Image: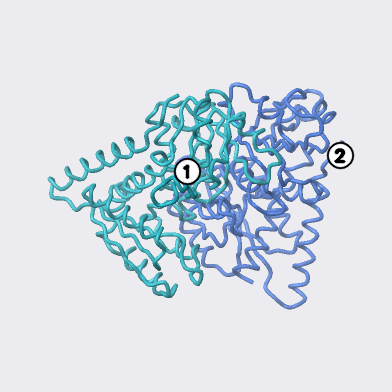
Chain colours: A blue, B cyan
């Protein structure tokens, strides 16, 4: 069994981008910039936003975080997005989800210029992904593909089974891996809670991607011997043996499933760390493509 | 075995739309209008365009066909689309595909206002389909769902296997049927030529959708007893016993597969006829939603 080291790969990607940006600076060019927008004070979102901003700075990008109060109006948020859509110093715009209930999330995402949609959540980005065009791919989905790529895991002709059909992970990774290209070309099944017996699908997977948000959901008997197992879950569970009374686990019962898998991602230290690395990659791409 | 009668269902839908439009006319309201644009003189495309125009008129819609010569420039075509984007009398714009090689098809499709994208080919329409939002769905994919609906074929929790991953059929029907709603909610597999053994996937299908364009490709031993079989193929093959030396067949070996299927669509007389009916439905929807 080979442990897929998301920490190592994410660090490699950040280093690659850092080097490219250093080269830009030496040439006296503008550097890529990302604006992150946080509405309200959800503690989880604050951590995410801080990590994203920090990663940008470490890579040599410009980064600004706009922190708006929880009662910010939709209109004001849209105004701010419009400002950054027209600001040439910022090539990527990320609005931290979830937004307060009085704001229409879809409307906000659609207000971001597709050229700056580094989260890959805009319908145009998703449509282009389905069509196989070069676009911004949701960071988690792109991160999964990148891990498979860097571990030389063949996807072509393989059966990929995705558990979960979220707009952020399940649907984009399914559409990404069914495309006709070298790093995809897989037979893809998307299964979910409507199935009477999920294991009937998961057991046929050469590559199993768990993205349902249920701690330890994928058990040993749901996995084929030698399968590649990608765990997207980030679930906090109570654990009195841990200093802060809880710990983070994935959607996969790692201790048991890892005995059967040929490759497996740990949680933490797997897919989660790739998300920020791909955000940097998308921002750098936005810079090259539209704003360099 | 029940034969799914696409001709009957398509006629029902046309009748329903016709009645709705009659009601509009009685109220003195504007009627829905569709413009179809044909570039060049491909005989197949001419037949399709004629049939579409004719169906509009029969349903009481306005319809105009713009016929442009094969050497029309991309610029002129884009200008014409822009004209109809701003024309309040036409609620749907359909550009017949394929276009001559000197014209960038993607650019043309993206030039159509998403509000008039009755073919459902615009990246925004596809993205919204993936996200589960109300949008224009590719007519063939929508037609398949409509057939399943009108024959009360349960899709929820069923395993749908789609053979083929085209942008026009395979990908949209897969994304449509995996959505969490009453007429979808299926476990969906998209398989294609990269699979070593396609039958390993097709044999597990409760609902098998063949959309690969290979005459009689799906054989009896590839289908589970009692499966629902939807044949999207329209292939013209040589047949000296037929008056014009050829006939149209689907992707399914109908005589043998129909013995095993619980429901099956014939070719011709199945999915193909639904496409135009759904085009009318999409045009009527565009009218109601954006232009009524």
From the viewer's perspective, is B137 left or right of A145? left
Viewer-side residue, B179 vs A43:
B179
Q: Helix, strand, or loop for circle 1?
A: strand
> In the structure shown, which secondary structural element does the residue marked by tag 2 occupy?
strand
Q: Is residue B24 left or right of residue B289?
A: left
Instruction: Give the spatial CA distance, label 1 vs label 2.
Output: 49 Å
Report x, y in % for residue A110.
48, 53
Q: Nearer the viewer, mark 1 or mark 2?
A: 1
**Mark 2 packing: few (<14 Cα in 10 Å), some, or many (20+)?**
few
State whether residue A40 is above or below residue A24.
above
A272 vs B48, left or right, is right
Residue A116 on image: x %, y %: 57, 61
Neighbourhood count class around disc 1 (C-alpha, 10 Å): few under 14, some 14–19, many 20 upward = many
A74 or B231, which is in the foreground? B231
Q: Tell which residue pokes out farthest to the right in this image.
A: A1
* Residue topped by disc 1: B249
Residue B101 image point, x, y percent: 51, 69
Which quadrant is home to the N terminus of chain B? top left
Placement of A161 over or under A123, stated as above or below:
above
Instruction: Provide the residue designation for mark 2.
Output: A2
Q: Residue furthest bottom?
A: A28
| Disc number placed over residue B24 in the picture, else none | none
Q: Residue at x 49, y 64 (%)?
A: B105
Chain letter for the residue marked with disc 2 in the picture: A
Which residue is at the front of the view, A15 or B174? B174
């Amino acid at each position: 069994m080979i442990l897929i080291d998301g920490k190592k790969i994410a660090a490699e990607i950040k280093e690659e981008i850092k080097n490219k940006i250093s080269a830009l600076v030496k040439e006296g060019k503008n550097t890529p910039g990302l604006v992150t927008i946080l509405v309200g004070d959800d503690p989880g979102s604050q951590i995410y936003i801080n990590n994203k901003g920090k990663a940008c700075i470490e890579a040599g990008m410009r980064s600004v975080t706009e922190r708006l109060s929880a009662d910010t109006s939709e209109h004001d948020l849209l105004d701010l997005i419009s400002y950054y859509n027209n600001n040439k110093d910022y090539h990527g715009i990320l609005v931290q989800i979830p937004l307060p209930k009085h704001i229409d999330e879809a409307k906000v995402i659609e207000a971001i210029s597709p050229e700056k949609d580094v989260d890959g959540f805009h319908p145009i980005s998703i449509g282009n992904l389905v069509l196989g065009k070069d676009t911004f791919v949701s960071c988690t989905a792109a991160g999964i593909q990148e891990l498979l790529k860097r571990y030389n895991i063949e996807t072509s002709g393989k059966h990929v089974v995705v558990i979960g059909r979220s707009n952020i992970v399940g649907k984009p990774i399914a559409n990404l891996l069914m495309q006709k290209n070298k790093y995809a070309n897989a037979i893809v099944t998307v299964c979910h809670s409507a199935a009477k017996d999920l294991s009937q699908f998961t057991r046929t997977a050469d590559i199993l991607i768990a993205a349902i948000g249920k701690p330890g959901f994928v058990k040993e008997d749901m996995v084929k011997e030698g399968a590649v197992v990608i765990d997207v879950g980030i679930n906090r569970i109570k654990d009195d043996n841990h200093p802060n009374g809880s710990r983070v686990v994935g959607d996969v019962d790692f201790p048991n499933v890892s005995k059967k898998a040929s490759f497996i991602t740990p949680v933490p230290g797997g897919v989660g760390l790739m998300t920020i690395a791909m955000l940097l990659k998308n921002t750098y791409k936005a810079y090259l493509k539209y704003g360099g």
